[in-house]
Amino acid sequence: MTISRRSLLLSAPAALGLVGLASMRPASGYEPLPMVAPGPMVPGPAPVPVPPGIGPRWAAEIPVETTQLLLVVGEHQDSDRCTGALWSRTARGWRPQGVWPAHNGLRGWTTGHREDDLRSPVGLYTLTDAGGLLPNPGTRLPYDHSDGFEIDGTGFGGEPLAGTFDHVVAIDYNRVPGTSPQDPGRPRGDEFGGGIWLHIDHGGATHGCVTLPREGIVALLCALDPTARPVVVMGDAMALALGGPAS
């Protein structure tokens, strides 16, 4: 969130059919129950070549070494509501691992983010660093546990912001990867904004960050693995589908 620190993530398990039912002799005076044939196996979600919603323009930018991807899709260009879904790449393709409702910038999305435009930047960005006011919940990313993540005040709808930086993941937009999310460095210059994070949802729009429910942020943190070269692909649905469906 581009604001003062003080002032202010479907994996469905396969359903198992009943197997190996043993025949039993009923007690005297009771009729045996009919045997039930084992039900069919119900597989989990089938892997796909590219997570749905990512067109060839962005699919081509997914690094070959990346096996974890957070896909954030906005309802439309000017909406502050979106959905975040974690995907994992296997030898057969991408599988969904979790999905959460989310919020983004108050004015929606932009491909030309500027400081204080109240829009979230469309694009593909690496996820390398995390931190928060609370201790590391179990992430393997470098984690900066610091009082510097304390925040108060209210959001655009008057909702309290306290606790929203309990856990954050830095989105590597105009920042130096390998540093704390609090690092003020902006390699492209201040005019392009910065401080774009994934953080805990406070029930409303942001200055440019993307927010997930508390349980989603914790689950995402615990899932992210630096060796998987995780990235986020984020933007409104139309922008992410640029070029048509990926094939």
Image: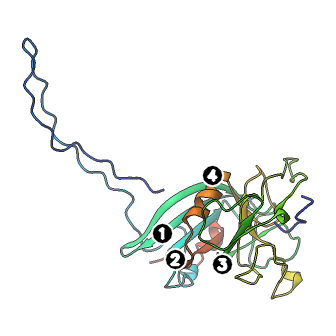
Label 4 vs 3, first from the N-terminus: 3
Task: Write down the residue under mark 2.
Answer: 228
- Image-based side of 111 in relation to 27, left or right: right
Q: Position of residue 107 (x, y in %)?
A: 81, 63
Task: Write down the residue under mark 3.
Answer: 125
Q: CA distance from mark 2 to mark 3?
A: 14 Å
Q: Which mark is residue 207?
A: none
- Seen as rendered, the residue at the extreme top is 29
Which is nearer the eye, 85 or 30? Answer: 30
Q: Position of residue 194 (x, y in %)?
A: 81, 76
**Tags 1 and 2 in contact by the CB under 8 Å rule?**
yes
- Single out the mark in the foreground, 2 or 3: 2
Q: Amino acid at mark 3?
A: Tyr
Helix, strand or loop under label 4: helix
* Residue 11 higher or lower than 48, as above or below: above
* Residue 18 higher or lower than 31, as above or below: below
**Tags 2 and 3 in contact by the CB under 8 Å rule?**
no
- Identify the image quadrant of the N terminus: bottom right
Helix, strand or loop under label 2: helix
Q: CA distance from mark 1 to mark 3?
A: 16 Å
Judge the density around disc 1: few (<14), some (14-19), many (≥20) Cα neighbours within 10 Å: many
Task: Write down the residue under mark 1.
Answer: 88
Question: At 51% from the left edge and 67% from the top edge, which residue is drawn?
Answer: 87
